[in-house]
Structures are given as C-alpha cells and as structure tokens.
Amino acid sequence: MLAKISTLPRNIFTVFIQKQTYVNLLYLWVNIGFGFTYYIILQVCLSLSWGFIYPNIAILSSTSLDFETQLKLSGVILVGLLVIPSLFLIFQLPVVPEQALANLLLKESIRLDTAMWSKDSCFFRPWRLLISASPWKRFLYMVCKVPLGGISFFAFFNVFIPAAALFGMPLAYLVGFRNLIIGPWRFDSVEKVLAAFLSGILLVPVALHGMNLLAKISGLLAKTLLTTSKA
C-alpha cells in the first residue's frame, strides 16, 4: 500500500512524457470538428424534415382543400419523410475515415469497412440498411459524436487551456506581461505568478489525465460501434 502511495506522484506526472498523451490531444481536437459537423448535418436534416412535415399536416387536417392542393401538400410531406432516411444514409459516409482515425491515433484495431462501397452494400441495396446491424451502430456512433465533440470542446477551452495558461504564467511574466488576467483572476505580482505556476503544476497533469480518459472512452465507443458485423 505504501509503495503504491509513494509512486502516485510519479504516475501522475509521467503523463507529460507519454507520446500517446499528445496524440490523444490531437484526436480530441479533431473530434471537436467532427462533432460540430455532425451536429450541423443533424440539425439541418431534422429542421428540414420538421418544416416539410408538420405545417403541411396541420394545413391538411384543419382546412378543406381541393384534390390538387392536397396532392401537392402530400408530396411535400413525402419529401420531409424522405429526409430522415437520407440522414441515415449520410451518416454512413464518414465510417471509414472515423475507423482509420481511431486506428491511427488511438491504436485501436478496427477493420476498415471498404466493403461498404461494394455492389452488395447498403448504398446499392438500401434494404440492407434495415436488416443489418452495422448501419444502425454507425448511425448511433455519429449521433454520439455530437455530445462527445461538445465535451471535447469544453475540456479543451475550460479545463486544459486555462490550466496550461497557469503553468506558463512565469514565462509570460518574464517576457514582460506584468498585468495578466485569466478569468476572474488578475496576476500583477511575482507572488501571484508563482502561485499560478504552482497551481498549474498540479492542474495540468490532472487535465491531461482527464483528456486521456476522454480519448479512451472515444476509442472504446468507436471499437464497439464501428466494428463491422454481419447481417
């Protein structure tokens, strides 16, 4: 027990010299871009679908219209309904890049699903979307990437960067910045700068361990949902 306690500080600070730590930071940074991209696609498709379906159903149910107008409104509703499977299909497209990224940066062993572009895939035989588990898992993964991207964004800009700023405070002070403000705190003396530096020494490794944990969760999610399964 005492041996474990004595090695605890070393285990905490070795995160600085581990190459995978910085690779994980790169993955999470890319994760932010993917997450926001999927969020925009999701919002646009759902907004289009809702805009096509709901108002026209309300019009059809509340007013008496001639047959031609009813037919036009029904066509618009049909377009809105088709947006949903289109979203499902769009979210199959980034699968191979996501698999490759997880393999390259997170050292996962996910087989690249190049077969999805073959003539037997769901793109050429759409009914396979319904009977195969893999497309549903991929869709769930892309949806999960939206909150994961948001969490990565929060972790970078509200945890890691402020901690790194505290850690680098002495360097900024020596360069000539004598009145620095980080959030609600002002650092305008040597004592405050040293206190910030000591806080940074403690906070940066904790932040890096948190980022590593987030990357590990992302890798586990990718391995679970992006591993191809047979129909």
Image (cartoon, grey):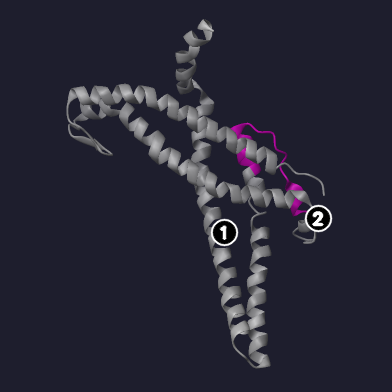
Instruction: Give the residue furthest to the bottom.
Output: 66
Instruction: Give the residue furthest to the front.
Output: 62
Q: Are marks 2 and 1 in contact (CB under 8 Å)?
A: no
- The percent coordinates of residue 6 (x first, y second) are 47, 8
The residue indicated by pointer 2 is: 131
- The percent coordinates of residue 196 (x first, y second) are 28, 26
Q: Residue at x 51, y 6 (%)?
A: 2
Q: Which residues are magenta?
A: 99-118
Q: Residue at x 62, y 44 (%)?
A: 98
- Label 1: how many residues lie within 10 Å, few (<14), some (14-19) or many (20+)? many
The residue indicated by pointer 1 is: 42
Asked if the stretch drawn in magenta spans residue 113, the answer is yes
Q: Secondary structure at mark 2?
A: helix
Q: Residue at x 68, y 49 (%)?
A: 138
Q: Is residue 83 above or below residue 216?
A: below
Q: Quadrant of the N terminus?
A: top right
Residue type of the residue flagged with mark 2: Ile
